[in-house]
Amino acid sequence: MTQAIAVSLLAVAGFIIALWWTNIAGIAHKIVGASMAGVAALFDNQLSDDAKEAAARRAGVQLILGGLNLTWRIALALAAAGLPILLADLAGLAPGSAVLDVMLRLDYIVIVSVLAFAAVKIVSRLRRSETPQDNGVSQYSPVDQFVHNLAFSGPTVQKAAARIEARLMPRPPMPEAANPIFVTSLARGGTTAVLNALHDAPEVATHTYRDMPFVTAPVLWNKLAGGQRREVRRQQRAHGDGMEIDLDSAEAFEEVIWKMFWPERYKGSSIPLWEAGDTNEQADRFLLNHMSSIIRARNLQADPLSVQKMRYCSKNNANIARIPYLLKSFPDCRIVVPVRRPESHAESLLRQHNNFSKLQTQDSFVSRYMADIGHFEFGNLHKPFMFSGFEPAQKDTHTPDYWLQYWTCAFRNLLAYKDKCIFLLQDDLRASPKATMEGLYDALGLSSGEQSFGRYFHSKPDLTETERFDPDHLQEAIEIYGVLEKCARRDLLRDVI
């Protein structure tokens, strides 16, 4: 009996080692990825019919080859399991029938399965701890990518998701979305850090990564996806700036709705600005309902005894191009604009432009993801907003002066609304985060408690070399920054120096 058990364990070990050695899990993962990629291509509204057909044919070939690869690996694993049994039987150590009787016992199957599962989990954790983790959207599994592509196969899907949520989940009554807060600036201006700091306010409701990919139906999607049981380990986001995220991190997904109602604005190599006269009542109603839906989703996820969330807050860098529209369509809104020193801001934009150009070249899904959620700030997908005076064709996007010119035109445009926005200096957020954020909380009418605002902002001075920039262009930018600095001092009643 003892010999039969020993031989059976050798057989199990041979089977597992053969599967591991032939990387059968990796092959299976590739097969799933190929099948999902083929189906997802059919839902990709960015592909032509010919491209979809080619992708489907390519996926079919990969499935056939993958099936053959799996077949010989499974056969090899079965041979590796049978070899110890055959040798033991030939040597007279243990009859093959006795070994098989042991292996077919229920208690044996349960114990060996539990031990094998535990061993695999331990080895997987050790390998993850030793292997540098990839960033951001590149960690999407093939199934995740398929669901994402399905959700963003066209604006009809997102609109339909919102309608389905409204019909299936009509109770309780939708909360009123009054006094929304819009955080906006050029990318790399500190909007994400400010959003996270505002996310601390008990009254504030924001988008989170749990809302992806059906961002227009946050309540319904969270229930279908498992709610709070769905977890993702914290990881550094794709920007490589040290900021870590998980499913409950606040993020910017509002641009999906603007793309739904103004698709023509995104078709060219640049994006025109929104003016107050660009009225779209259907879009305004949809946005208001969406704000209410986000508020409801966050309240359902919160502790029932906590303060009810009633203030929608979004971070949307693209809103810098539609300030007059927001002020007209949502007259009770508050617009918060973080302002970073022009030379540091331009340098950071250039760095991220180079970073995402590389990422999008290496992984096509990164490009698809960024395009779907409306992030055209940098990378191969870069579409600048056409601020007055900005001439993108004059400079190479991989030079610092391009981004300095972009900064200058963007914030010169904002000076027309300096009495309508609340300006924050990133220098103040770094030097005095508590006083600066408490001043912002007061200006917005939010409740501040014992939040540790310092954890959201870098403490080092935001300095960069200026020799790389055209002196005349830099001087113009610095003069605009000086005006914005005075506005920031005016807007926040607290002394943040």
Image: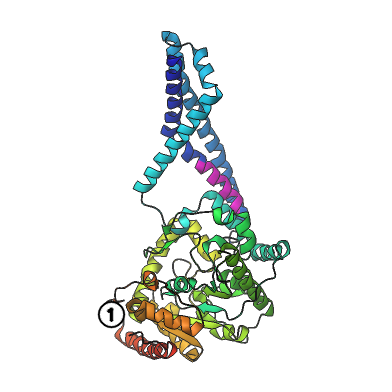
Residue at coordinates 51% horizontally, 76% vertically from top-left? Answer: 318
Q: Is residue 136 magenta?
A: no
Amino acid type for the residue under numbered disc 1: Thr
**Quadrant that contains the C terminus:** bottom left
Q: Position of residue 115 (x, y in %)?
A: 45, 32
Q: Tag 1, which secondary structure?
A: loop
Question: Is residue 388 at all visible to an observer of this figure?
Answer: no
Q: Residue at x 47, y 90 (%)?
A: 418
Image quadrant where residue 428 sits: bottom left
Residue count near mark 1 (Cα–Cα under 10 Å), binned few <14, some 14–19, many ≥20:
some
Magenta highlight on residue 36: yes
- The kind of secondary structure the magenta stretch mainly shows is helix
The image shows residue 209 at horizontal and vertical percentages of: 52, 62
Q: How is the image coloured?
A: rainbow
Measured along the vertical axis of the image, is residue 254 above or below residue 84?
Answer: below
444 lies left or right of 497: right
> Measured from the top left, where is residue 481 in percent x and y?
37, 87
Up the image or down, 7 lies above or below 423; here it is above
**Highlighted magenta segment, given as a residue range:** 29-41
**Nearest the camera: 207 or 41?**
207
Q: Is residue 303 left or right of residue 482?
A: right
Residue 237: quadrant of the picture:
bottom left
Q: Is residue 441 visible?
A: yes
Task: Looking at this view, name the residue that lies furthest to the front.
Answer: 305
Residue at image coords 60%, 54%: 225
Give x and y (percent) for residue 484: 40, 88
Residue at the spot of label 1:
466
Please tell me which residue is depicted at 46% across the width and 70% down the height of the picture: 196
